[in-house]
Image (cartoon, coloured by chain):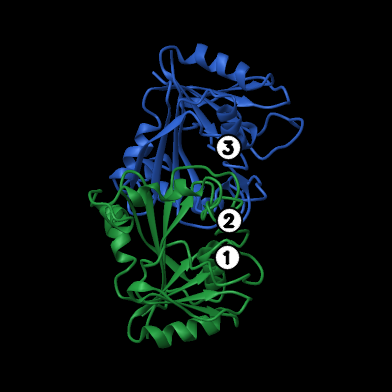
Chain colours: A green, B blue
Amino acid sequence: MSRVRVHNLAMSLDGFVAGPDQTSTAPLGVGGERLHEWVFDTAFGRAMIGESGGSDGIDQEFLERGVEGIGATIMGRNMFGSVRGDWPDESWTGWWGPEPPYHHPVFVLTHHPRPPLEMAGGTTFTFVTDGVLEALERARAAAGDLDIRIGGGATTVREFLVAGIVDHLHLAVVPVLLGSGERLLGADPRLLDGYACTEVSSSGHVAHLVFERASAG
Amino acid sequence: MSRVRVHNLAMSLDGFVAGPDQTSTAPLGVGGERLHEWVFDTAFGRAMIGESGGSDGIDQEFLERGVEGIGATIMGRNMFGSVRGDWPDESWTGWWGPEPPYHHPVFVLTHHPRPPLEMAGGTTFTFVTDGVLEALERARAAAGDLDIRIGGGATTVREFLVAGIVDHLHLAVVPVLLGSGERLLGADPRLLDGYACTEVSSSGHVAHLVFERASAG
C-alpha cells in the first residue's frame, strides 16, 4: 500500500512551522519566510522560482526525496490560501501561480465546499470537506501505487500524526527563533510514540530529522 | 577577557531542556534522562560514571569541547540540587558524589546563603546570592585567563542570554518529545539576536547547533 509521507517540514528552533498572522502576502506568517531560506539556497529551490544556480548537497537531497514517488498531496486550507470562512469567489487559486509545482492531484482540507480547480502542468486542487480520512482515501485512489504526501501546515500534519497514519516524517530544524506562530509539537509527549528516529543529519545550515513509523512496510 | 560559554545543553525536539517535577532521584525531571542518553553512549560519558568503552566521533568531540579551557562554572540552584527554599542543613552536596567532575570553582546561584563547600578533586561550590552579574564577576576572578561555563539549567542560561553575556551557545537537539518541563526558548523571538549560527552538525543521533555572539572576540 502507498505510504503517507511528510517531507521538508521546516521548524524553527523554538518549535514553530509558521509565524503568526498569515495573510495573502505572508503565506508563512510574520517571519515565517526565514524558515525557507535554506530551500532557496539550493538548486531545487531556485528552480521552483525559475532561477538557475543554487547548491546541491544534503539540503538538495532532502528536497528531492520529498517529491520522489509522490502521486498525490494533501494540505490544509491555510497552506492553500489565507482566505478564511466561505470562499467569497473562485479567484484565489493558491500561492503558486498558474502552474503549481505539484503536477499531481492535491486535496485541500476545508469546511467550505468549492468546485475542483484544474491548473496548468497537471495539478488539480480538490476541496475535501469530510476530514482527514476522506482526504486520505481520495488521495490513495488518485495516487495509485505512488505515495501520499502531507504538505502541511502544522494543524494538518498533527491531525494525521494523531490519527496514526503518517509513515515517514522529515523535519528540517532551522536555527532561527520566531517566538510565536503555529507549533507542530504541542503538549503531547506521545505524538511520536511508535516512531523511530532513523536519521539525524545536517547540511551545516539546517538539521534534518527523519522519523519512521515502526510498523511501516 | 575570558569568554562565557554554554555547551552540550540538551534540548528535546519540543523545546525542553528538562522534564517536569525534578526530585532528588530525578535530577532532570520526569523523562529528562532521555535527553542525556547520547552522552552515556560516548567514551566521555562512560568515563564520567567510571566505565570504559563508548563511542568517539562528533558527540564525543562536542563533549570534549565543553571542558576545554574552562576555569569556572556557574549554575542555577536546581542544577545543584532539588532542595528548594532555605537549606535545611548542609547534607546535600550536589548530584555528583564526593568528587564532582568539575575540578574547578563552581558558583551556584541561589537566594539562600550557605557556606562554601569544598569537594574532592578541586571542585568547590560557592553559593552566590546577588544574581548573575555577581556570579560572573566572581567566576571571572576565579577562572583567571580561562573561560566561564554556564552549566544550566534553562532559567540560568536564559538569564545570562537576556543579560547579553553569553559568547558561545551550543545546543544539542535530541529527537525525543517531553511534552512539558523547562523550556530554554520561550516566547522571545529576539533572544538570539546578535548571534550567528556558526555550526549545525550531527552525529546521526543528535543535532548540534552552535551560536556565537557576533561581537565575541
Which numbered disc, 3 or 1, marks the residue closer to the eye?
Answer: 1
Asked whether the beta carbons under mark 2 and mark 1 sit within 8 Å of each other, the answer is yes
Residue A201 in view of the camera: yes
Residue B153, labelled with which disc?
3
Q: Assess disc 1: are there few (<14), some (14-19) or many (≥20) residues with their C-alpha within 10 Å of its C-alpha.
A: some
Task: Tell me residue A206's x, y (percent).
Answer: 37, 48
Task: Tell me residue B152's x, y (percent).
Answer: 55, 35
Q: Amino acid at mark 3?
A: Gly
**In the rendered structure, which disc, 2 or 1, sits on the residue that comes first in sequence?**
1
Q: Secondary structure at mark 3?
A: loop
Instruction: Please say if B144 is above or below B99.
Output: above
Mark 2–mark 1 Cα distance, whole angstroms, equals 8 Å
Q: Amino acid at mark 1?
A: Thr
Instruction: Please say if B116 is above or below A169.
Output: above
Q: Secondary structure at mark 2?
A: strand
Q: Assess disc 3: are there few (<14), some (14-19) or many (≥20) residues with their C-alpha within 10 Å of its C-alpha.
A: many
Residue A182, labelled with which disc?
2
Protein chain holding label 3: B
Protein chain holding label 1: A
Q: Which residue is tagged 1?
A: A155
* Number of marks in the rendered image: 3
Task: Tell me residue B100's x, y (percent).
Answer: 50, 32
Q: Assess disc 2: are there few (<14), some (14-19) or many (≥20) residues with their C-alpha within 10 Å of its C-alpha.
A: many
**Toward the viewer: B80 or B13?**
B13
Q: Secondary structure at mark 1?
A: helix
Asked whether the beta carbons under mark 3 and mark 1 sit within 8 Å of each other, the answer is no
Quarter of the figure with residue A154: bottom right
Mark 3–mark 1 Cα distance, whole angstroms, equals 31 Å
Which numbered disc, 2 or 3, marks the residue closer to the eye?
Answer: 2
Q: Amino acid at mark 2?
A: Glu
The quarter of the image holding the C terminus of chain B is top left
